[in-house]
Amino acid sequence: MQQTNLYTVTIPPLVKTLSALKSILEKAKAHTDTKKLTWMDFEHALLTDKLVFNQFDFKKQVQVACDNAKGAAARLAEVEVPKHEDTEATFADLVARIDKTLAFIATVKPEHIIGKEEMKISLPYWPGKYFTGFEYATEYVLPNFYFHITTAYAILRKNGIDIGKNDFLGDLPLKDA
């Protein structure tokens, strides 16, 4: 049985969910390829769609989810957060961003994070405040990450992309009884 620690509660779930999101994006791209509409670029319409007027669009939801994941890995490992410009304009670009994020996260090893539960983590948008490493991971990063992934998923679902809960969950570690 695997021992629970700050690494196991953050990095594997971030990687698993980003991998599921990548598969969802690939399904969305395949769907848009079947919709060759002369009056509208369906891919662009999906990438810029929102659930409500004052929320980030689909593209930004994916960008922020990637930023959450790489930021968490970097901050917990006490290394510089990689910068990714928000220039994606296609599903393929967003898949490439996920791939870059996953490649960075793969450089962070358990020994870089295990034992950092009490470290202080400050974020620029809350000056003079900090989280412990454990609070940052469990109270901020994971809920915020899943919020953006769920919103991205919901935007695609409302637009008729054939995805379901199994796509969102990704591969499950089921064992024979």
Image (cartoon, rainbow, N blue to C red):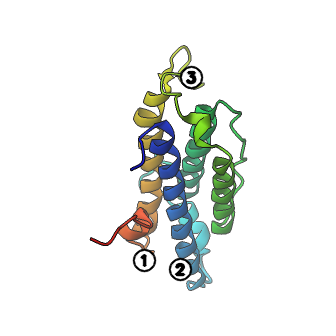
Q: Kindly indicate whether the residue at mark 1 contacts the one at mark 3 (C-beta within 8 angstroms).
A: no
| Residue ID for mark 1 | 162
Give the residue displayed 71% in from the left and 33% down from the top: 80
Q: Which amino acid does label 3 sit on?
A: Ser
Distance CA(mark 3)–CA(mark 1)? 40 Å
Q: Position of residue 26 (x, y in %)?
A: 57, 73
Residue 110, given in percent of the width and then of the height, sits at 58, 41
Q: Is residue 164 left or right of residue 119?
A: left
Quadrant in the picture for the C terminus: bottom left
For numbered disc 3, what is the local secondary structure?
loop
In this view of the protein, which residue sits in the foreground, 43 or 54? 43
| Residue 36 on image: x %, y % | 60, 85
- The residue depicted at 72 percent of the width and 53 percent of the height is 87
* 1 and 2 marks in contact (CB < 8 Å): yes
- Residue sitting nearer the eye, 44 or 168: 168
- As drawn, the label of residue 174 is none
| Vertical relation: 68 (above or below) 116 | below
State which tag comes first along the sequence, 3 or 2.
Answer: 2
Residue type (three-letter) at the residue carrying disc 2: His
Where does label 2 land, which residue? 31
Quick one: label 3, few (<14), some, or many (20+) residues within 10 Å?
some
Mark toward the start of the polypeptide (1 vs 2): 2
Single out the mark in the foreground, 3 or 1. Answer: 3
Which element carries disc 1, helix, strand or loop? loop
Provide residue 97's location: percent of width, then percent of height. 67, 56
Q: Determine the CA span between mark 3 and mark 2.
A: 41 Å
Residue identified by numbered label 3? 122
Q: Which residue lies furthest to the left in this view?
A: 177
Q: Is mark 2 on a helix, strand or loop?
A: helix
Q: Which amino acid does label 1 sit on?
A: Asp
Residue lying at 63% horizontally and 67% vertically, measured from the top left: 91
Q: In this view, does 175 lie above or below 140?
A: below
